[in-house]
């Protein structure tokens, strides 16, 4: 798909990957409806983009059904939509028993319920050809200690993308599952990033991720797992999960230290 003149609804536009994605999409000539909860951040982003007059903002808490309904009434969507990018998400890096009921609920509502409900409601408004891009994660195919709920949510989004893509085959609507690996944004806690440094996990910049996302979108590639060895790990986990169990078991002590005791205790003990 060529993005010139296409209307794109981008959720989580004010976040790390969202902002970088908005810049890439605007540079390709797309017209953006930028969604987030903070009007000032969205308006600043809109003004910084190429051709700011082509873009609009929509303030909505996607965990709220009423806000989602209000988003659907946005005048920019009156004439239909070419691309929906479900990008907004949240995470909680912690052992399950240390998470509150509210933290669990927030992750499931924003990462699973919101994109499914938004997609369902927007399906009749998509102009053909159209693309739905769901931003997943490599943790949507490989379970990782400290991320049980986030993994559950991203596995769900992965399954949703695959099933919907098959449901809509030959309909003129392409469904893409785009899965970044660890990226330096505000999504995760400092303890999580410190753990990644301690484990030697590669960390991408949001600009690299956005570049790949736009290539994936333009090529309409159904599935994209970013980075090596993460893409290989996704395949290995599907075929021989016991090998991945063994590999991740070696990292468990470090993961637990950062997940349960946070940055101070983790840093104090140093990397392993
Ligand atoms: N960063 C990583 O390491 C990483 C790795 C793999 C995959 N991903 C995926 O990449 C996507 C973008 O992540 P990111 O790292 O850019 O995250 P981020 O920097 O934390 O941005 C999250 C975005 O979601 C919005 N948001 C949060 N809560 C919301 C709510 N209740 N309703 C509406 N919008 C809400 C935030 O805007 P407001 O706060 O203004 O609402 C922000 O624009 C996510 O799907 C994430 O799972 C990220």
Image (spheres, rainbow, N blue to C red):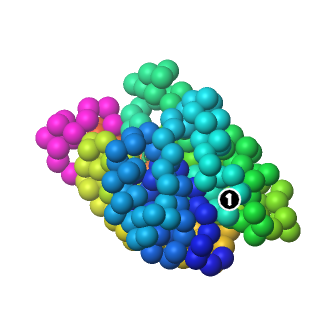
Q: What residue is rendered at 79% in x and 51% in y?
A: 124
Which quadrant of the figure has residue 172?
Answer: bottom right
Tell me residue 163's x, y (percent).
Answer: 77, 54
Q: What residue is rendered at 45% in x and 63% in y?
A: 53
Residue 154 visible (yes or no): yes
Q: Which residues are magenta?
A: 259-272
**Magenta portion: prevailing SS class:** helix
Which quadrant of the figure has residue 165?
Answer: bottom right
Quarter of the picture containing the N terminus is bottom right
Tell me residue 127's x, y (percent).
Answer: 75, 63
Judging depth in this view, the residue of 154 and 76 nearest the camera is 76
> How many labels, in total?
1
Residue 205 on the magenta segment: no
Is 27 drawn above or below residue 119 in the view shown? Answer: below
Task: Tell me if the residue at label 1 has its CB under 8 Å from ligand 1.
Answer: no
Tell me residue 19's x, y (percent).
Answer: 40, 59
Q: Farthest residue toward the left?
A: 268
Q: For numbered disc 1, what is the local secondary structure?
A: strand
Residue 263 on the magenta segment: yes
Q: What residue is rendered at 17% in x and 44% in y?
A: 267
Is 29 drawn above or below residue 36 in the view shown? Answer: below
- For label 1, the crowd category at 10 Å Cα-Cα, with few meaning under 14, some 14 to 19 and many 20 or more, is many
Q: What residue is rendered at 70% in x and 62% in y?
A: 175
Residue placed under numbered mark 1 in the picture: 81
Q: Is residue 111 left or right of residue 22?
A: right
Is 212 drawn above or below residue 179 in the view shown? Answer: below
Q: Is residue 160 left or right of residue 197?
A: right
Which quadrant of the figure has residue 152?
Answer: top right
Judging depth in this view, the residue of 47 and 225 nearest the camera is 47
Residue 174 visible (yes or no): no
């Amino acid at each position: 798909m060529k993005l010139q003149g296409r209307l794109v609804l981008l959720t989580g536009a004010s976040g790390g990957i969202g902002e970088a994605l908005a810049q890439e999409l605007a540079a390709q000539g797309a017209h953006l409806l930028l969604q987030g909860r903070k009007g000032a951040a969205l308006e600043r982003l809109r003004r910084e983009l190429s051709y700011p007059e082509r873009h609009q903002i929509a303030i909505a808490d996607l965990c709220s059904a009423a806000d989602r309904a209000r988003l659907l009434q946005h005048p920019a969507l009156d004439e239909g939509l070419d691309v929906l990018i479900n990008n907004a998400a949240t995470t909680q890096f912690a052992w399950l028993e240390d998470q509150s009921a509210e933290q669990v609920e927030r992750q499931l509502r924003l990462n699973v319920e919101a994109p499914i409900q938004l997609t369902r409601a927007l399906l009749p408004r998509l102009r053909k050809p159209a693309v739905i891009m769901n931003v997943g994660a490599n943790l949507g195919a490989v379970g990782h200690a400290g991320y049980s709920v986030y993994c559950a949510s991203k596995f769900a989004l992965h399954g949703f993308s695959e099933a919907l893509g098959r449901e809509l085959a030959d309909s003129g609507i392409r469904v893409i599952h785009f899965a970044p690996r660890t990226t330096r944004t505000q999504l995760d806690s400092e303890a999580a990033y410190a753990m990644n440094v301690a484990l030697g996990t590669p960390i991408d910049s949001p600009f690299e991720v956005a570049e790949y996302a736009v290539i994936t979108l333009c090529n309409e590639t159904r599935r994209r797992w970013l980075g090596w060895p993460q893409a290989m790990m996704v395949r290995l986990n599907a075929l021989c999960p016991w090998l991945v169990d063994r590999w991740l078991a070696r990292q468990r002590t470090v993961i637990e230290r950062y997940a349960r005791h946070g940055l101070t205790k983790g840093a104090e003990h140093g990397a392993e």
